[in-house]
Amino acid sequence: MTTMNVTQFKTHCLGILEAMRDTPKEVALTKRGKIIARIVPACDEGETPWKHLRGTAHFRAEDLFADDKVWEDF
């Protein structure tokens, strides 16, 4: 992630946005040293944001049913 001052971004806005097309990296905008906004690259129009999460979660069913006492409490 690149960090820059709002004034720098304002001066070089179009160039930064063009560079993000080639190298999609997040840009954090700061004002007086504190991050106030983030600019993130857009995903492809045919691609939905949650498709990036595919394959990142893991579900283990044996953990749910490991203890029968859980079901008795209801």
Image: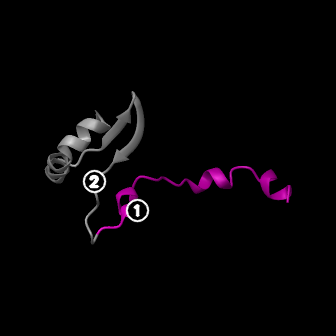
- Quarter of the figure with the C terminus: bottom right
SS for callout 2: loop
In the picture provided, is 70 more to the left or to the right than 9?
right
Sequence order check: which comes first, mark 2 or mark 1?
Answer: 2
50 magenta-colored = yes
SS for callout 1: helix
Q: Residues within 10 Å of mark 1 (few under 14, many from 20)?
A: few
Q: Which residue is mark 2?
A: 41
Q: Which residues are magenta?
A: 47-74
Residue that lies at the very extreme toward the right in this rendered image: 73
**Residue 1 visible in rendering:** no
Q: Which residue is mark 1?
A: 50
**Up-down: is 13 above or below 7?**
below
Q: Nearer the viewer, residue 33 or 46?
A: 33
Which residue corresponds to the image point at 59% horizontal and 56% vertical from the top-left?
61
Residue 50 in the image, given as x and y percentages of width and height: 40, 62
**Up-down: is 58 above or below 30?**
below
